[in-house]
Image (cartoon, rainbow, N blue to C red):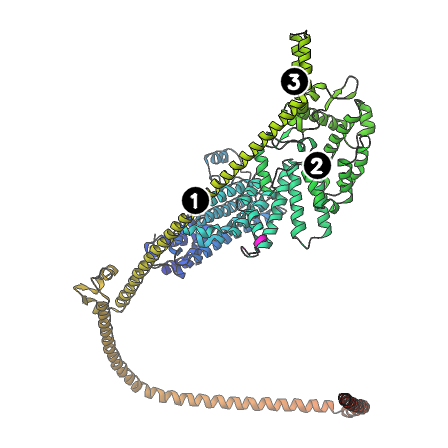
C-alpha cells in the first residue's frame, strides 16, 4: 500500500481515487495515513479532521466499521488534549452517515414494496429481521443457505445490513465516549438516538442490551468518581434526561421489567431529592431545572402506574395515580378542569379496584396477596416499591381512600365515580348492590380511559356483596342469587363461581396464618357451595371464633379448669373455703399488684430514658468523631488533589516547553533545508553537515539555536548571491536576444503596414457604398408609406380635434371643482384658526380673572 509522509498528500490522493469511483482504495490510503507515525506525532490540525470525516464516511459506505473503530481510537489519542470537540464533530458525522444509509434503505424497500411487479408482502423496517448482534455468515446460516431458498428479499437484506450498521455505530460511540469528560453531551445524545432507533424499528432485544450497557458505564463512573477527570461525567441533568427517555421507550416497547429497572435507576440518581431541593431552596440546579424536574416526575409516576397495572398490583397502581394527580394539581397551574377530572376519576377507580382481602392484610405479612391468589413479592419488595413512589409508609386500601377525602380529590372526579365510591364503601345494600352499580359501570365503560377498571371493580363489588350477604343470610339458593342479586348482566355465574373459589382459597390462607387471622375481619367468614341442593352456605364455626387472640387466654383457663376437675373430681370443704377466701382477697391483691406494676413501669420508663440519654450522648460523640474524621479526610483529599493538580500542571508546562522547542527547531531545520541548494548543502555546523542534523541534535544540545541561525543566514546569503548572478546572466542573454529580434522584424513590420493599409481602405469603401444603398431603400419605403397615409390625413385630424375638445371640457370642469374644494379647505382652515385664537383668548382672560381673584383673596 502506498505510504504518504504528509497527511494532506494522502487526502489529495484519496479524493482523486474517489473521483474515479475507487472507494476501497481511497479507504485503504486514508486508513494507512491515520495509522502512520507522522499522523500521531505532528499534533492536531484541521487536515486531520478532514481526513477523519472522509474516513468514517467511507467506512459506513463500504460497511467496514472495524476500520472506523480503529481510526476513532487513534484520533481520540491525538485530539484528547488539543481539540476534543473535533472528535465530537467526527462522531456526529459518523452517526448521521449511518442514519442516512438506513433511511435510504427504508425508502428503497418502500418503493420496491409499492411497485405493482412485487409479489411479496411489503417489508416492515426492523420487524421480522434477525438479531443485530449475531455473527454474520455463521456456519448454521451457510448450511441453511445451501439447503433452502433465500426467503428474504434484497430489500430486506439491505435493511438488515443498514440496521446492523447503525446499531454497531451506536455501540462503538458509546464505548468510545464512556469515559471522555468533555464529550459527555455527545455520549448522552448518542444514547437517546439509540433509544429512538430501538423504538422506531421495534428492537426490544437490542434495547435491553443497550440498557445493560448504560448501567455498566454508569457503574464504572461511580467506581471512579473520586478521580478528578470523572467529576464532569456525573452531571445530573444529562443522566436524568437520558434515563427518562429510556423509561418512555421501555413503556412504549412494553418491556415492563426494563421499565421497572429504569425507574429504580431514576430513583437512585436522585430524581425525588433534586425535585425537593429545587422546591425548597429555589436554586437552579441546572438549566430550567424546576420545569424539567416537574415534567420528569409526572412522566415517572405515569410510567410506574402502567407497570403496576400490567403486574395487577392494584394497590401500588392506585398509589402511583394519586401521586401523579397530586403532582399535577399542585405544580401544573395551567391544568384544565377536564384533565383534572379525568385523572381524579382514574385515581378513585384505581383505589376502588384494590381487592379488599389483600388490602386488609397487615404490612408485616410475609407476602401481600392481591387478586386471585397472585403473589406480588415479599415485604422488602413492597418497601422498595413504596420508596420508588416517594411514599413514607407502606400503603393500604383504607389509607389511600383516606387520602382521596383529605386531599379533596373525590370532588374532582366524575359524578359516576363518586356514586360508585359511595355505594361500595358506605352503603349496606346486599340485595341491590349489583343492580345499583350496573348503570354506573356501564357509564364508566363508555370512557376509554376508565374502561379497564370495570372488571376489577366488579370483582371488588362481588367480594363486598358476599361479605354483606354473609351477615344477613345463612343459606341462599344459587338460582335466587343469579336471578335477583348478581345477575348475568353484571357477572356471569361462571365468573362468579371462580371468584367464590378464590374467596375460599383466600380464607384458607388467612386462617392458616396466626397474625393475619387476627387482622382480617373476613377470616371468620366460611363459604360453601352445595351443588346437591344448589345453595350457597355461609357458616361461622366456633373454631374460627376460638382462634381470635382475645379469646385465647379465656379458652386456656377453661380448658385447664376442666382438666383439673377431670383429674380431681371431688373437692373438700377446706378447699372450697380456701377458694372462697382467695376470691374475696382477690380485689385487694389486684390493687397491690396494680401498684407494683405501676412502680415497675415507672422504673422501667426511667431506666429507658437514662439508656436513651446515654445512647444519645454516645451517638452525638460518634457523630462528632465521624465529622472530625470526615473533615480530616476531606482536607487530606483536597491536599492530595492540589498536589496532583500541581504535578500535572508542571508536567504539562514541561511538555509544552519541550514541544515548543521541538516545533521551533523543526521549523528552523525545515526552512534551512528548503532554502538549501546543492552548493550550500555542504555547510558544516560543529562538524556535521546540514542535511545530517535532526531535531534530537538540537534538543540534546549538540547544536544550539545560534548555530542554526548562523547557518540560516549563511544559506540566505549564498542563495541571494546565486540569485543575483543568475539574474545578471539572464538580463544579458535576454537583452541580446531582444535586440536581434527587433533588427530582423523591422522590414517585416513596414511591409505588413502597407498591406494592412490597402486592406483597410478597400473595406472602408465597401462599407460606405453599402450604407448609401441602405439609406436610399429606406427613403423610398418612407415615401410610399407617406402616400398611403395621405388619404386618411383629414379624417385623422378631425377625430383628434373632437377628442381634444371633449378632453378640454372635462379638464375645465375638474379644474373648477378642484378650485372650489381648495377654497372650501382654505375657508375651513381660516375658521379653525379663528376659533383657536378665540379659545386661546378666552383661556387667557379666564386665567387673568382667576389670578386677580386669588390676589384679592390673599389681600
Whether label 1 touches label 3, CB < 8 Å: no
616 shown above or below 589: below
Q: Report the side of 461 relative to 267 (left or right).
A: right
Residue 560 appears at what percent x and percent y?
Answer: 65, 14
Is residue 145 something one can see in this rendering? yes
C-alpha span from label 2 to label 1: 52 Å
SS class, disc 3: helix
Per the rendered image, the range of residues in magenta is 279-286
**What count of labels does the image hold?**
3
Identify the mark at residue 353; answer none if there is no mark. Answer: 2
* Residue 244 or residue 691, whichever sits in front: 244
The reply to whether the magenta stretch includes residue 464 is no
Looking at this view, name the residue that lies furthest to the left. 687
SS class, disc 1: helix
Q: Earlier in the sequence, mark 2 or mark 1?
A: 2
Residue 412 appears at what percent x and percent y?
Answer: 74, 47
Is residue 807 something one can see in this rendering? no
C-alpha span from label 3 to label 2: 41 Å
Residue drawn at x 70%, y 40% as measured from the top left: 402
Residue drawn at x 52%, y 46% as measured from the top left: 269
Q: Report the side of 793 relative to 297 (left or right).
A: right
Mark in front: 2 vs 1? 1
Q: Earlier in the sequence, mark 1 or mark 3?
A: 3
Residue 257 appears at what percent x and percent y?
Answer: 57, 38
Whether label 2 touches label 1, CB < 8 Å: no
**Circle 3 sits on which residue?**
556
**Circle 1 sits on which residue?**
625
Instruction: Place residue 305 in its image quadrant.
Output: top right
SS class, disc 2: loop
Amino acid at each position: 500500500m502506498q505510504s504518504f509522509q504528509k497527511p494532506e498528500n494522502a487526502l489529495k490522493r484519496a479524493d482523486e481515487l474517489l473521483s474515479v469511483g475507487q472507494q476501497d482504495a481511497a479507504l485503504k490510503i486514508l486508513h494507512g495515513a491515520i495509522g502512520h507515525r507522522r499522523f500521531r506525532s505532528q499534533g492536531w490540525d484541521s487536515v486531520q479532521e478532514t481526513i477523519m470525516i472522509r474516513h468514517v464516511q467511507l467506512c459506513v459506505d463500504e460497511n467496514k466499521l472495524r476500520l472506523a473503530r480503529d481510526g476513532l481510537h487513534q484520533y481520540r489519542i491525538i485530539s484528547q488534549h488539543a481539540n476534543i470537540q473535533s472528535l465530537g464533530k467526527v462522531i456526529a458525522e459518523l452517526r448521521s452517515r449511518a442514519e442516512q444509509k438506513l433511511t435510504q434503505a427504508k425508502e428503497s424497500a418502500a418503493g420496491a414494496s409499492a411497485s405493482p411487479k412485487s409479489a411479496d408482502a411489503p417489508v416492515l423496517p426492523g420487524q421480522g429481521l434477525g438479531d443485530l448482534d449475531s455473527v454474520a455468515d455463521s456456519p448454521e446460516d451457510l448450511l441453511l443457505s445451501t439447503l433452502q431458498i433465500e426467503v428474504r428479499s434484497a430489500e430486506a437484506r439491505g435493511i438488515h445490513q443498514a440496521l446492523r450498521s447503525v446499531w454497531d455505530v451506536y455501540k462503538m460511540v458509546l464505548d468510545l465516549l464512556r469515559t471522555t469528560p468533555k464529550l459527555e453531551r455527545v455520549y448522552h445524545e448518542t444514547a437517546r438516538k439509540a433509544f429512538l432507533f430501538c423504538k422506531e424499528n421495534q428492537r426490544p432485544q437490542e434495547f435491553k442490551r443497550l440498557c445493560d450497557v448504560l448501567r455498566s458505564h454508569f457503574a464504572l463512573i461511580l467506581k471512579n468518581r473520586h478521580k478528578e477527570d470523572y467529576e464532569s461525567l456525573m452531571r445530573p441533568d444529562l443522566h436524568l434526561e437520558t434515563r427518562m427517555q429510556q423509561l418512555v421507550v421501555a413503556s412504549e416497547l412494553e418491556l415492563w421489567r426494563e421499565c421497572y429497572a429504569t425507574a429504580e435507576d431514576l430513583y437512585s440518581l436522585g430524581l425525588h431529592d433534586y425535585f425537593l431541593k429545587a422546591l425548597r431552596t429555589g436554586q437552579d440546579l441546572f438549566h430550567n431545572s424546576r420545569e424539567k424536574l416537574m415534567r420528569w416526575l409526572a412522566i415517572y409516576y405515569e410510567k410506574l402506574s402502567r407497570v403496576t397495572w400490567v403486574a395487577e398490583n392494584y394497590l401500588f397502581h392506585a398509589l402511583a395515580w394519586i401521586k401523579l394527580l397530586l403532582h399535577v394539581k399542585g405544580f401544573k397551574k395551567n391544568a384544565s378542569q377536564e384533565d383534572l377530572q379525568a385523572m381524579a376519576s382514574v385515581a378513585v377507580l384505581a383505589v376502588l379496584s384494590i381487592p379488599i382481602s389483600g388490602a386488609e392484610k397487615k404490612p408485616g405479612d410475609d407476602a401481600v396477596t392481591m387478586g386471585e391468589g397472585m403473589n406480588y413479592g415479599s415485604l422488602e419488595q413492597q418497601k422498595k416499591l413504596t420508596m420508588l413512589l416517594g411514599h413514607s409508609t407502606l400503603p393500604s386500601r383504607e389509607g389511600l381512600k383516606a387520602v382521596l377525602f383529605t386531599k379533596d380529590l373525590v370532588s374532582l372526579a366524575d359524578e359516576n365515580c363518586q356514586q360508585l365510591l359511595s355505594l361500595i364503601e358506605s352503603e349496606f345494600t346486599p340485595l341491590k348492590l349489583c343492580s345499583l352499580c350496573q348503570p354506573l359501570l356501564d357509564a364508566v365503560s363508555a370512557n376509554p380511559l376508565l374502561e379497564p377498571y370495570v372488571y376489577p371493580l366488579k370483582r371488588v363489588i362481588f367480594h363486598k356483596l358476599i361479605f354483606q350477604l354473609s351477615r344477613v343470610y345463612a343459606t341462599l339458593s344459587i338460582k335466587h342469587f343469579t336471578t335477583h342479586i348478581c345477575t348475568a348482566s353484571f357477572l356471569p355465574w361462571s365468573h362468579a363461581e371462580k371468584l367464590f373459589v378464590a374467596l375460599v382459597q383466600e380464607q384458607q390462607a388467612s386462617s392458616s396464618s396466626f397474625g393475619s387471622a387476627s387482622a382480617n375481619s373476613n377470616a371468620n367468614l366460611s363459604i360453601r357451595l352445595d351443588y346437591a341442593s344448589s345453595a350457597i352456605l355461609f357458616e361461622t364455626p366456633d373454631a374460627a371464633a376460638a382462634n381470635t387472640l382475645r379469646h385465647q387466654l379465656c379458652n386456656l383457663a377453661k380448658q385447664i379448669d376442666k382438666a383439673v376437675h377431670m383429674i380431681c373430681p371431688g373437692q373438700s370443704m377446706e378447699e372450697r373455703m380456701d377458694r372462697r377466701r382467695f376470691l374475696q382477697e382477690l380485689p385487694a391483691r389486684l390493687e397491690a399488684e396494680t401498684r407494683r406494676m405501676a412502680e415497675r413501669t415507672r422504673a422501667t420508663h426511667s431506666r429507658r430514658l437514662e439508656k436513651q440519654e446515654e445512647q444519645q450522648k454516645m451517638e452525638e460523640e460518634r457523630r462528632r468523631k465521624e465529622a472530625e474524621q470526615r473533615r480530616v479526610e476531606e482536607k487530606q483529599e483536597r491536599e492530595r488533589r492540589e498536589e496532583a493538580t500541581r504535578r500535572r500542571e508542571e508536567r504539562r508546562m514541561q511538555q509544552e516547553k519541550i514541544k515548543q522547542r521541538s516545533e521551533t527547531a523543526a521549523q528552523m531545520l525545515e526552512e534551512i533545508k528548503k532554502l538549501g541548494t546543492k552548493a550550500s548543502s555542504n555547510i558544516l555546523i560543529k562538524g556535521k553537515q546540514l542535511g545530517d542534523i535532526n531535531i534530537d541534535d538540537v534538543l540534546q544540545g549538540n547544536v544550539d539555536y545560534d548555530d542554526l541561525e548562523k547557518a540560516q543566514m549563511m544559506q540566505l546569503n549564498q542563495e541571494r548571491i546565486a540569485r543575483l548572478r543568475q539574474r545578471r546572466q539572464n538580463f544579458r542573454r535576454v537583452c541580446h536576444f531582444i535586440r536581434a529580434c527587433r533588427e530582423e522584424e523591422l522590414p517585416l513590420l513596414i511591409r505588413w503596414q502597407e498591406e494592412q493599409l490597402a486592406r483597410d481602405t478597400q473595406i472602408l469603401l465597401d462599407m460606405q457604398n453599402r450604407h448609401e444603398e441602405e439609406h436610399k431603400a429606406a427613403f423610398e419605403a418612407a415615401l410610399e408609406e407617406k402616400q398611403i397615409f395621405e388619404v386618411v390625413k383629414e379624417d385623422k385630424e378631425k377625430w383628434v380635434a373632437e377628442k381634444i375638445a371633449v378632453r378640454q371640457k372635462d379638464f375645465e370642469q375638474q379644474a373648477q371643482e378642484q378650485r372650489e374644494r381648495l377654497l372650501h379647505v382654505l375657508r375651513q382652515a381660516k375658521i379653525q384658526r379663528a376659533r383657536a385664537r378665540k379659545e386661546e383668548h378666552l383661556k387667557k382672560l379666564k386665567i387673568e380673572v382667576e389670578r386677580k381673584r386669588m390676589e384679592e383673596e390673599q389681600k
